[in-house]
Amino acid sequence: MGNVFVLDHPLIQHKITHIRKTDTGTKDFRDLVDEVAGLMAYEITRDLPLTEVEIETPVAKTKSNVLSGKKIGIVPILRAGLGMVDGVLRHIPAAKVGHVGLYRDPETLKPVEYYFKMPKDISERDLIVVDPMLATGGSAADAIQSLKKRGANKIKLMCLIAAPEGVDHIKKEHPDVDIYLASIDEKLDEKGYIVPGLGDAGDRLFGTK
Ligand code: PRP
Ligand code: URA
C-alpha cells in the first residue's frame, strides 16, 4: 500500500498559510508555490541512491558520496502543476519533464485529457507527478493511469493541498503510489473545491479569472 506523507516542516507550513490567503496576489502566489515545491523536493528525494567516489580536498584524499545518477522525470499536470516544476528542478536539474494536460469538466468534475508528451524512456525513470491540488483525485488518478499505460512503473505524487476524498481515491486506484502533501484539509464543497483550500490554483497562478 502506498504511503501518505504530510510534510510538516515549519517553512513549508508557514508558506502554505500565505499561499492560502485571498489577499496573496499572483506574483507572490507563484513565488510561494515555487518555494514550497522546492522544499518538498528535499523530502521526496530522500531515498535517492548514492555512490561513493574518491575525491581530493585541499587537505587530503577522501571518499565521499554523490548521487548515483538515477533517472528522474517530473510530470506536471497542466496547468497548475507547471508552477511546481522549477522548484523541483532547482534541486534535481538533470531531471526530464513530461506534461499531462487535464482539466476538470466543471459540470461532471471528471478530468478531460487534452495533452500528453513524455520523455521516451519513462519506464526507466522514477516519475514525480506534481499538481498543487488533489481534490476529488480524478485528475491525478487519470494522469497516473495514462503514465502506467505508457510503461511507467515508479510513480510518486506530490501536491500542496489535498482533500481526504482525493487521498482515498489515489490510495484505492493506485495503491503503489506514495503521496507527498503539505496539508490534508477538511473536505470538498459541493463544487469540488477543497475547504478551506486556496481556491482555484490555476487561476491564482496565472492571473486568469
Ligand atoms: C485543478 C488542479 C488539479 C485538479 C484537481 O485543475 O490543478 O489538476 O483541479 O481536481 P480533482 O482532484 O478533483 O481532479 P483544473 O481542472 O482547474 O485545471 P487548470 O489547472 O487548467 O486550471
Ligand atoms: N482545483 C483547484 O484548483 N482548487 C480546488 O480547491 C479544487 C480543484
Image (spheres, rainbow, N blue to C red):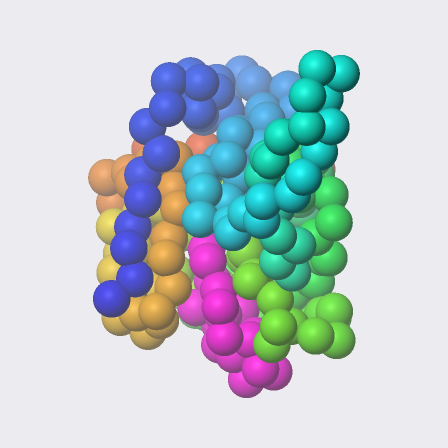
Up/down of 32 relative to 209, above or below: above
Q: Nearer the viewer, residue 109 or 151?
A: 151
Task: Specify the quadrant that holds the C terminus.
Answer: top right
Q: Quadrant of residue 5?
A: top left
Task: Specify the quadrant that holds the N terminus.
Answer: bottom left
Q: Position of residue 122 (x, y in %)?
A: 64, 72
Q: Is residue 126 magenta?
A: no
Extreme-front residue of the structure: 60
Q: Residue at x 60, y 35 (%)?
A: 63
User: How many numbered marks does the figure carry?
Assistant: 0
| Residue 209 in view, yes or no | no
Up/down of 21 relative to 125, above or below: above
Q: Residue at x 70, y 52 (%)?
A: 95
Up/down of 194 relative to 20, above or below: below
Q: Position of residue 149 (x, y in %)?
A: 55, 84
Q: Nearer the viewer, residue 44 or 98?
A: 44
Q: Position of residue 64 (x, y in %)?
A: 59, 35
Q: Is residue 42 left or right of residue 123?
A: left
| Residue 10 in view, yes or no | yes
Q: Residue at x 50, y 24 (%)?
A: 19
Q: Which residues are magenta?
A: 140-157
Q: Nearer the viewer, residue 166 or 4?
A: 4
Q: Is residue 153 magenta?
A: yes
Up/down of 144 relative to 74, above or below: below
Q: Residue at x 56, y 18 (%)?
A: 24
Q: Quadrant of residue 61?
A: top right
